[in-house]
Amino acid sequence: MSVTVVGSLNEDVVVTVDRLPGRGETVIGSAVAVLPGGKGANQAAAAGRLGTGVHMVGRVGADPAAGRQLAALADARVNVGRVQRTEGTPTGTATIPVEADGGENLIVVVPGANAELTPADVDVESVHRAGVLLLQLETPLDTVRAAAAATRGTVVLNPAPSQPLPADLLARVDVLVPNEHELRQLADAPAGELSPAELAELARGLGARSTVVTLGARGALVVPADGPAHVQGPPPVRPVDTTGAGDCFCGALSSALDRGETLADAVRYAVTAAALSTTGAGARGALPDDDEVQALLA
Ligand code: ATP
């Protein structure tokens, strides 16, 4: 089988500053890095690096950034035959000033060609026949909905960036993968600390079959369709940069589900892969291969 990702491709322009500018203020940056990004492409790259067959469905512009994004995905062994170039619209861009001491950042996303991905674009064989269809919310909601309706595979939805979801889409989702913030927003939960049991109760009310809530350094909460919820902790690692850990998690989870692993085993695999991804800089800087994950699982 294989994993098909329907989602975004962005160019990330990361600018290092001592301090984020205030409104109307100019500050001088000390470095700029142009990196491949976009939640869809990051998740596809994670699954590709793990050795899974991956097809990417998306849109880029007809500009130099598009070539860089496609090359980066191909380098991660992702099939990009269904990524279309869109005349007259730029490749999606995220501009990210980040404080040098690893503190605060700001993110401005221009969706560009990602916003042009239509339901007709996802009426393709790689979506129909996917073992796992992996979706996020950086492309139009109607397109995400159409993809989920068109596939015979397992539907994994990472509801990021967070937005209200229609019941018909949630009913098609086999595994919903929010972080805690996204879960709270989807469930309209009040502020305040919640126990894993309380988070599981919120998750069960959403309408997806199963839910996996990512909990950062605490690992992930597995809320299966039937049976009790449990927390899967991460292996001991020394995190350097957690950017993109959530994307690595989703790609790895989809890889393991595509191989036929149970949800609990797939989450154990994803927690391990995501932990390894935090040991290097950048969203795609330390994506592990399958051997590295298996070595840590053994
Ligand atoms: P991001 O948006 O930064 O990619 P996220 O908010 O979507 O992240 P998180 O819950 O922060 O998602 O992290 C996803 C997964 O990555 C976690 O479930 C966990 O398995 C792993 N992870 C994140 N931070 C750490 C850490 N400090 N140590 C070990 N594993 C981590």
Image (tube, rainbow, N blue to C red):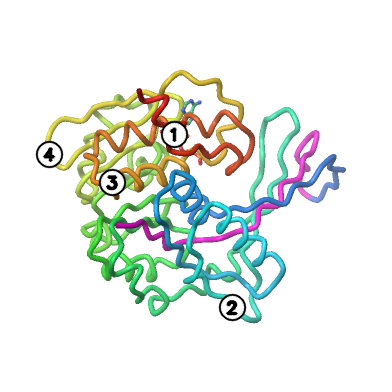
In what element is the residue under mark 1? helix
Q: Nearer the viewer, residue 230 or 20?
A: 230
Disc 1 residue crowd, few under 14, some 14–19, many 20+, Cα 10 Å:
few
Residue pointed to by mark 2:
86
Q: Is residue 29 left or right of residue 183?
A: right
Residue pointed to by mark 3:
257
Residue pointed to by mark 4:
226
- Label 3 sits on what residue type? Leu
Say which label, 2 or 1, has the lower sequence index. Answer: 2
Q: How far apart are the alpha carbons under marks 3 and 2?
A: 32 Å
- Label 2 sits on what residue type? Thr
In what element is the residue under mark 2? strand
- Pointers 2 and 1 in contact (C-beta within 8 Å): no
Say which label, 4 or 1, has the lower sequence index. Answer: 4
Image spot of residue 240 (x, y percent): 61, 27
- Label 1 sits on what residue type? Asp
- Pointers 3 and 2 in contact (C-beta within 8 Å): no
Disc 2 residue crowd, few under 14, some 14–19, many 20+, Cα 10 Å:
some
Say above or below: 288 vs 192.
below
Look at discs 3 and 4 and give the one toward the viewer: 3
Q: How far apart are the alpha carbons under marks 2 and 4?
A: 44 Å
Q: Residue at x 60, y 59 (%)?
A: 10
